[in-house]
Image: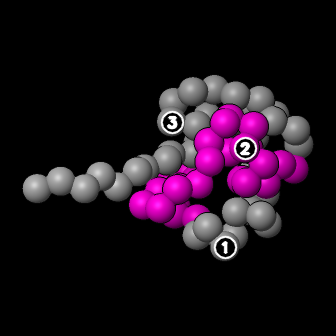
Amino acid sequence: MNITINKNAIQVKENSTLKVALAEAGINWQIGMAVAVNNEVVRKSMWDTFILKENDNIIIINAVCGG
């Protein structure tokens, strides 16, 4: 099945969870990271059970400290 992570197209197995897709894309969770699927934020506690669908668009945002 085809999905997009930060504008990069990747393929994952049918019924893959968000956690599996992120792992397959080589993305490891870190503090300050937020993930949205189709513009809806998905809490980290839901990544294990959030099932992706064909053409889902995932956006990963990392908070940056600065001043």
* Residue segment shown in magenta: 15-42
Q: Which residue is mark 1?
A: 45
Q: Horizontally, is 64 left or right of 45 in the view?
A: left
> Is residue 38 shown in magenta?
yes
Q: Secondary structure at mark 3?
A: loop
The residue identified by callout 3 is 6
| SS class, disc 1 | helix
Residue at label 2?
23
Q: Earlier in the sequence, mark 3 or mark 2?
A: 3
- Whether 27 is among the magenta residues is yes
Left or right: residue 21 versus residue 31 is: right
What percent of the width, then of the height, locates residue 17? Answer: 79, 54
Q: How is the image coloured?
A: one colour
Q: Nearer the viewer, mark 3 or mark 2?
A: 2
Quote the CA–CA distance across marks 3 and 1.
Answer: 21 Å
Q: Which numbered circle lies on residue 64?
A: none
Residue 62 visible in this rendered orientation of the protein? yes
- At label 1, counting other C-alpha atoms closer than 10 Å, the crowd grade (few under 14, some 14-19, many 20 or more) is few
Residue plotted at (42% across, 50% down) = 61
Identify the amino acid type marked 3: Asn
Cα gap from disc 3 to disc 2, whole angstroms: 14 Å
**Above or below: residue 65 compared with residue 48:** above
